[in-house]
Image (cartoon, helix red, strand yellow):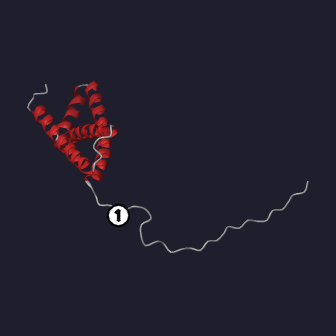
Amino acid sequence: MSQVSRPVSRPVSRPVSPPPSRPLSPHLQVYRWQISNTLSILHRLTGVALALGGLALGGWLLALASGQAAYAAANWVLSSLPGQVFLVGWTFCFFYHLCNGLRHLGWDAGYGFEKEVARRSGLAVVAAASLLTVIFWVLALTGMLE
């Protein structure tokens, strides 16, 4: 059999055009920052914080099962000022994620997409999460949750 030689293909050279003076896609210069942007990012961050807090909860449960010395050490860490700030923050993350999840359920049902309604419901989520966090810690610190 004889081999057929094929011509070598060369890439087609195209003229290089100057870059456009505007963004190629919508960017931060085009859109005005809104509360919805912030709340969307906060929802993702609180989800990550809840996962990390779940690891801390698992560590606390492991210390509880490991004996009195391990439990005392875990209790010392969580009762320190940074530990208490972590717990309050984690509680806020829980309530924010819960309230915003309920807001998303409303959206899934087709409600609350109007611009003003979405803005007000977002502010209501932050207010409700803050209020629930305060109520929880008042009840916890006064011993009413025991």
**Dot 1, crowdedness within 10 Å: few (<14), some or many (≥20)?**
few
Q: Which residue is mark 1?
A: 30
Q: Is residue 134 left or right of residue 4?
A: left
Please, is residue 132 above or below residue 66 in the view? below
Nearer-the-camera pick, 58 or 15 = 15
User: Where, by quadrant of the figure, is residue 34 drawn?
Assistant: bottom left
Residue occupying image coordinates x 25% and y 27%: 64
User: Where, by quadrant of the figure, is residue 129 drawn?
Assistant: top left
Figure disc tally: 1
- Residue 107 is situated, as x and y percent measured from the top left of the image, at 31, 41
Residue type at mark 1?
Answer: Val
**Residue that extends furthest to the left in the rendered view of this protein:** 142
Which quadrant holds the C terminus?
Answer: top left
Tell me the element at label 1. Answer: loop
Please, is residue 45 above or below residue 2 in the view? above
Nearer-the-camera pick, 11 or 46 = 11
User: Where, by quadrant of the figure, is residue 28 drawn?
Assistant: bottom left
- Residue 133 is situated, as x and y percent measured from the top left of the image, at 17, 38
**Residue that extends furthest to the right in the rendered view of this protein:** 1
- Residue 109 is situated, as x and y percent measured from the top left of the image, at 33, 37
- Residue 87 is situated, as x and y percent measured from the top left of the image, at 21, 39
Q: Is residue 54 left or right of residue 141?
A: right
Residue occupying image coordinates x 32% and y 43%: 48
Nearer-the-camera pick, 123 or 113 = 113
